[in-house]
Amino acid sequence: MAAEYERRRPDYPEEALRWAAEQIGLGEGARVLDVGAGTGKLTRGLVALGFDVVAVEPGAPMLEQLRMAVPQAEAHVGPAESIPLADASIAAAFAGQAFHWFDPERALPELHRVIAPGGGLALLWNWWDERDPLQRELGELVGYAGLEPYRDDELPGAPWFRELGRTVVESVEQSSPDAIVGYLSTASMFLTAEPQKREESLRKVHELASRYGESFPFPRLTYVFTFARVGDG
Ligand SMILES: C[S@@+](CC[C@H](N)C(=O)[O-])C[C@H]1O[C@@H](n2cnc3c(N)ncnc32)[C@H](O)[C@@H]1O
């Protein structure tokens, strides 16, 4: 599953990472944390920008995959609610497609503890672009229509963090019916579905996507939020 995840899920656009780093005011080579790092999709992007990256992920098989994919990053098993790093040891924390899994009551003070004064936090989500007719139809079919990957009232806030800014970065990749089925088969709603239902839904997805051809441009939205760490201590 971890290997499938690595193969099927999209990367984060460089523009999104640069925007977040600039908002937080990260210096060259700063030490940053990727929390809920999974197989290292975001870790890889942060390493490519020259940051000194430490990845923390609770799932050992995911972390194994990360160690192979991004050997430049330091990697530790652990959850966002109990991060195995010293106080004030990183300039910023990033979380890609992961913050909604954290328990904010415990993860926010913990992130605040490991981030140094003056540092920040960036949250990213790759998401559907329902202006695209195929994705609008898909949304109706699989149930994400009209949804957003985050909840505004659950984003980080006082007393730990203060929002700096938010943006949406648009990117386009080439996709295909098989790629869409592969991607959706790594989504939790399909992983947890009973096998027969899962197969049937994925067959319908393939049928729908095939109406758009064998290969087609697939626009994507990346939501990016940045936060300043509040306080000197
Ligand atoms: C959708 S994946 C995203 C992985 C990676 N950041 C990426 O962008 O590909 C969500 C990740 O959050 C991790 N996760 C779930 N609960 C977590 C928690 N409480 N603390 C840290 N990570 C968690 C999962 O193990 C999984 O690797």
Image: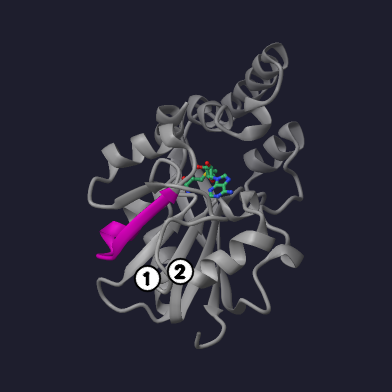
Confirm or reject: label 1 Cβ below 8 Å from ligand 1: no
Confirm or reject: label 2 Cβ below 8 Å from ligand 1: no
Q: Secondary structure at mark 1?
A: loop
Q: Secondary structure at mark 2?
A: helix
Marks 2 and 1: in contact by CB < 8 Å? yes
Residue at point 66%, 52% (across, down): 149
Left or right of 210: which side holds 92? Answer: left
Residue 80: x %, y % from top left? 54, 55
Q: On the image, which quarter does residue 31 sit in?
A: bottom left
> Which mark identifies residue 2?
none
Q: Residues within 10 Å of mark 1 (few under 14, many from 20)?
A: some
Based on the picture, tell me whether residue 53 belongs to the magenta stretch: yes
Residue at point 68%, 32% (across, down): 189
Q: Which residue is mark 2?
A: 114
Residue at point 24%, 65% (across, down): 50
Residue at point 26%, 75% (across, down): 28
Badge 2 amino acid = Val
Residue 20 seen in the current view: no
Give the magenta range. Answer: 46-56
Q: Which residue is mark 1?
A: 89
Residue 45: x %, y % from top left? 34, 56
Q: Vertical placement of 231 versus 3: above or below?
A: below
Left or right of 63: which side holds 223? Answer: right
Left or right of 157: which side holds 41? Answer: left
